[in-house]
């Protein structure tokens, strides 16, 4: 089984990048924007992560990581400042964006691009929805100070990232991973 690591909305929390790089050295990792890093900070991570820019990011003009077994098509003004990308990994077709430009229904968007899974951040709320074999996933925010979800007892839910497990050209499971203690 192959894994795709997805995280978003760090808002300055660099240790999550270091943690994921070490914990998942052989898995592709995609960051969905709003790091609020400087260009030099972001350059530290371009060899380890695919990424799209968020509404709180600077215009880096740094080309992100590409993995040998992932074909990426950028959908933005230029590929050095990706705002959206389409890629295929292990036979699953993904669309990745930060999410601040999407106003349509997620599944209409997926159908329009003939994709299997939409990855987006921005809301700071974890989402894993499935409809007719297609997925809309938001890993939530990986910064505990930015999480916008509460439990039934009114306590804050933990910050999170997600692991998408893929086998036989299909998404098998999507795991929400607590990252408060990273």
Image (tube, grey):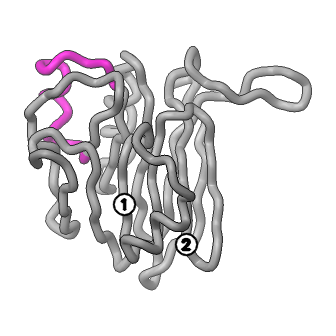
Residue 119 horizontal/vertical position (percent): 45, 53
Q: Classify mark 2: helix, strand or loop.
A: strand
Instruction: Tell me which residue sits at (41%, 19%) in the image.
Output: 11
Q: Classify mark 1: helix, strand or loop.
A: strand
Residue 47 horizontal/vertical position (percent): 14, 41
Instruction: Tell me which residue sits at (35%, 41%) in the image.
Output: 31
Give the distance between the C-alpha atoms of the residues marked 1 and 2, in whole angstroms: 12 Å
Residue 4 horizontal/vertical position (percent): 40, 58
Q: Which residue is mark 2?
A: 134
Residue 148 vs residue 6, the one in the foreground: 148
Residue 48 lies in magenta, yes or no? Answer: yes
Q: Which residue is mark 1?
A: 95
Q: Residue furthest front?
A: 104
Residue 32 horizontal/vertical position (percent): 37, 41
Q: Is residue 178 above or below residue 3?
A: above
Residue 111 lies in magenta, yes or no? Answer: no
N-terminal label among 1 and 2:
1
- Start and end of the magenta stretch? 35-50
């Amino acid at each position: 089984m192959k894994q795709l690591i997805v995280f978003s909305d760090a808002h300055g929390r660099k240790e999550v990048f270091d943690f994921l790089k070490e914990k998942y050295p052989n898995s592709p990792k995609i960051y969905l924007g709003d790091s609020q890093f400087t260009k030099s900070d972001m350059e530290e991570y371009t060899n380890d992560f695919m990424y799209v820019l968020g509404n709180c990011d600077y215009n880096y003009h740094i080309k992100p990581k590409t993995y040998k077994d992932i074909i990426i098509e950028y959908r933005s003004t230029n590929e050095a400042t990706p705002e959206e990308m389409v890629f295929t990994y292990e036979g699953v077709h993904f669309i990745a964006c930060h999410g601040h430009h999407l106003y349509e229904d997620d599944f209409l968007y997926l159908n329009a691009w003939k994709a299997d899974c939409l990855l987006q951040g921005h809301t700071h709320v974890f989402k894993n929805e499935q409809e007719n074999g297609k997925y809309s996933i938001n890993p939530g925010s990986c910064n505990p100070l930015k999480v916008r979800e509460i439990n039934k007892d009114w306590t804050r839910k933990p910050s999170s990232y997600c692991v998408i497990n893929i086998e036989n050209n299909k998404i098998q499971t999507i795991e929400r991973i607590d990252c408060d203690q990273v």
